[in-house]
Image (cartoon, rainbow, N blue to C red):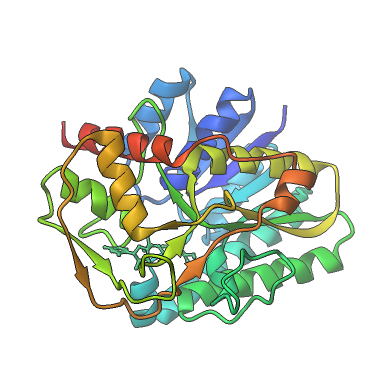
Amino acid sequence: MADILITGGCGYIGSHTAVEFINSGMDIVIVDNFSNSDRSVLGRLQQITGKRIRFYECDAADPQAMEKVFSENRISAVIHFAGFKAVGESVKKPLAYYRNNIDSTLTLLELMKKHNCYNFIFSSSATVYGESKDMKPFTENDEAGKCSNPYGRTKYMIEEILRDAANADDNLSVVLLRYFNPIGAHESGLIGENPVGIPNNLMPFITQVAVGKLPKLRVFGNDYPTPDGSCIRDYIHVADLAAGHMSALLYAENHTGCEVFNLGTGKGTSVLEMVETFRRVNDVELPYEIADRREGDVPYCVADPTKANKVLLWECKKTLDDMCRDSWRWQKNCIA
Ligand code: UFG
């Protein structure tokens, strides 16, 4: 059977996708250089799935190392997660972001051509949409590319590179997945998001406050044009997101060209609603204060997932309660 290459497979979304693929009976090969992930994830993946993981510790942008991966396996599809992803850091180190994120994509595309591999699934982001003018959910037809930071621009540039590559090669099939806000963790509590240092994102910050590692949450702004004044996002359970990659792969295997899909629930949740839901579901204290707006935040970012629902036959199954419960279980396990 052919192998599916998962770059960044020890990271947050990559590891959940690895579980989804293994549990569906697929053979996977993981590449990760642990630049933002932990070696212990490999053992945890084996614990969850009961399968040995084929793994290479290398940089997905390294042509020699990746040539070895392609020549030692029969790679039929690449799911490309590996990449730098911190918005603030990308503003300070733009060249590192362009070099790393774009180089890895080019390396993979060149090796895929050489080894007759034609399916590419790319981790893009809702950040490519920028600000919604009318506070309506984004469809894939909405304008993209007006990103406010280098990280977002790498995502959009890679989308364009992949579009060009698919135009030039009739065999190639590219699926661009625009993720909204992934949260939650595997229900076993064995894998989840484990940011280094003080978290930037809302859910890891919430769980670290709840567990007592951080004193209180700062809600960035309560004067946005939203019902309660705090920003609205489309939070999606990472397990639903992982399942979206399986649907995308099935689609890629049966089509050529380049298609883009939003992966989100279509439901918006404000920061204050998230705080309330987390408290209620987990019965924990969650001290917070209202702070100034965070630079670069948009008031509203929600997916219209209709295209993925219809074309990929994929939809989200987990609720916001599930997301809060699973994130909390993972956080408690991290401490233990
Ligand atoms: N927030 C707080 N306090 C915090 C952290 C976040 O109030 O301590 C608020 C933010 O202001 C925002 C919301 O919670 O309104 C969500 O913030 P996140 O940082 O969790 O997520 P973002 O929507 O800002 O960004 C995420 C990813 C990006 C990606 C983007 C796509 O982190 O990588 O979604 O829309 F590009």
**Farthest residue in the front direction?**
227
Q: Total number of numbered labels?
A: 0
Residue 212 percent coordinates (x, y) = 11, 46
Residue toward you, 29 or 161: 161
**Farthest residue in the right direction?**
170
Horizontal side of residue 286 vs 164, given as left or right: left
Residue 202 percent coordinates (x, y) = 32, 57
Horizontal side of residue 257 vs 183, given as left or right: right
Question: Which quarter of the figure is the C terminus placed in?
Answer: top left
Which quadrant does ligand 1 occupy? bottom left
The residue under the point 63% across, 22% down is 25
The residue under the point 30% across, 43% down is 278
Residue 69 percent coordinates (x, y) = 58, 44
Horizontal side of residue 106 vs 214, given as left or right: right
Horizontal side of residue 51 vs 221, given as left or right: right
The residue under the point 71% across, 49% down is 308
Residue toward you, 218 or 238: 218
Q: Is residue 36 visible?
A: no
Q: Is residue 192 visible?
A: yes
User: Quarter-wise, where is residue 253 in the image?
Assistant: top right
The residue under the point 54% across, 52% down is 267
Residue 86 percent coordinates (x, y) = 38, 67
**Can you say whether 188 is above or below 122 in the image?**
above
Question: Which quarter of the figure is the N terminus placed in?
Answer: top right
User: Quarter-wise, where is residue 159 in the image?
Assistant: bottom right
User: Quarter-wise, where is residue 240 in the image?
Assistant: top right
